[in-house]
Amino acid sequence: MTLLFLLLAANTRAAALAAPVDPAIFRDRAAGERASFLVVFREQADLSGARAIEDRAGRRRFVYEALRARADASQADLASRLERDGIPFRRHSLVNMLEVDADESVARALAREPDVLTIAANRPSALVREPSSIYVPRAAAAIEWNIAHVGAPELWARGITGQGIVVGIADTGVRWTHPALQAQYRGWDGASASHAYNWHDAIHDGHPMNACGSDSPEPCDDQGHGTSVAGLAVGDDGGENRIGVAPGARWIGCRNMDIGDGTPARYVECFEFFLAPTDANGENPRPELGADVVNNSWTCQEEEGCTDVDVLRPAVEALRAAGIAQSFAAGNSGPQCGSAYLVPGIYEAAFAVGATNLRDGLANFSARGPVLVDGSNRIKPDIVAPGVGVRSSQPSPPFLDPYTIFGGTSGASPHVAGAFALIWSALPHLAGRVDETEELLERSAVPLTSAIACNGLSGGDVPNPLFGWGRLDVAAAHDLATQRGSPAPVAGPRPEARVLPPRP
């Protein structure tokens, strides 16, 4: 009896000490059936020293090496045991975690490891797209209305087009041969293509019907979304189709969704590529070839495994620490107050973008703050940009129109990514200084307000939980920085806000 009591007590203590296992992982699995899950370790890398490193390349290298060192130290023992037992896994460092494919008994055993913080879900879920059938007439000189609306052509006229800046497109892929995108692809030299260090496919087990398959060796778009997003950031065919904010920038790409289905592990893998791109075999990472700006026109829902709202936060914070700017779609979950609830746009470290129309009205679908899901009451979005009836590139069969009308906060976000590229190209002393550049974009935005109040936060204030700081104006941002002659603009008087009527 005494021995039985001791055994029961020991088992109780072990269960109490075990890391939580997300019940969603095996909810629809039969006993013994495998599922993909994430083993997240307690210790994440200390990146606090990055801020003191002035050299951009040095800062990026510091962050990369710190992440790898912490992951190697934490994961070595478990990785060795998983490999010995023939259990499939993939190592990640941007978030210190292992992506494992195993049954529930293995997950429970891993949860009992003292270094493990949690066992998180890694389930695919479809990208939420906001269809846009609203047609807005073409602007003069073949410049789209939305591009003119954010002030980009004013900077082009000054010779500022994003030269020298690399924009990472994390999405459904990109059709790199599109006439508005091929010249901007960093892997194209005008005569031949090299995809090493310029493209990565995080889809290793693609759907059988996926036209791009798995581990595509060259940029491929299995849905069309990523090609449209890339066009709004950098697209220009050199003729009548001037569709991107920063046509002088170069782009590199990573497919993080399988026909629109993403998982936390896929998202993290693409973040890792943009921090330190790899060769065609996924090896020999080179941080110096990473993206300067990353556009993220996607959200991670609970159904994908983001039941823990913090699961992607270390990745977003790590890229920021490395001096990489990031633009995030706020989400198409509006119009209710508090509808900004999807990661990663809700994070303090994420620059979230809501969507507006031609008249600077907030799109009905655009997510509104404040952020309630984590108890922060944080104002989101941070800024807004055109995302209704915008024209961009699309992959298309021969003889069909390679351009389409696009919409959603997915369309708004690449305007801001392009704005980062323009500002950093024009003002190299700001490049890599994410905090200061975001403040510059906020302070120069066209302030927009509303009579709506959300969770005690007035829509009449600036910033507010509908429009954030207002609508992007990259020309005004450049003017503000150059007139003040300071890389860190200080708070000052703002233009009078434009009050819009409340929406239902």
Image (cartoon, rainbow, N blue to C red):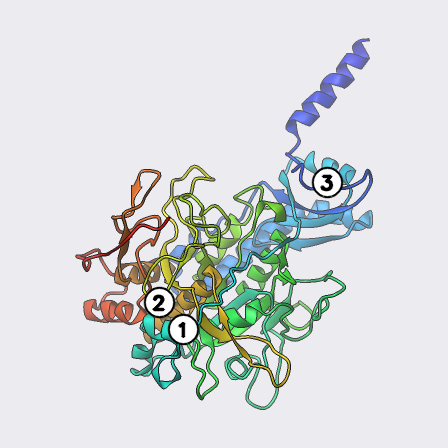
Residue at mark 1: 136
Of mark 3 and mark 1, the one earlier in the sequence is 3
Disc assigned to residue 358:
2
Q: Amino acid at mark 3?
A: Phe
Q: CA distance from mark 3 to mark 1?
A: 47 Å
Q: Residue at x 81, y 49 (%)?
A: 84
Regarding residue 251, the answer to whether it shows in the image is yes
Q: Note whether 138 is above or below 378 in the view shown.
A: below
Q: Residue at x 43, y 76 (%)?
A: 244
Indicate the position of residue 232 as horizontal and vertical percent values. Answer: 46, 72
Q: Amino acid at mark 2?
A: Leu
Q: Amino acid at mark 1?
A: Val
Regarding residue 322, the answer to whether it shows in the image is no
Disc assigned to residue 190:
none
Residue at mark 3: 26
Q: Note whether 176 is above or below 287 in the view shown.
A: below
Q: CA distance from mark 3 to mark 2?
A: 46 Å
Say left or right for 67 vs 434.
right
Outermost residue to the bottom: 191
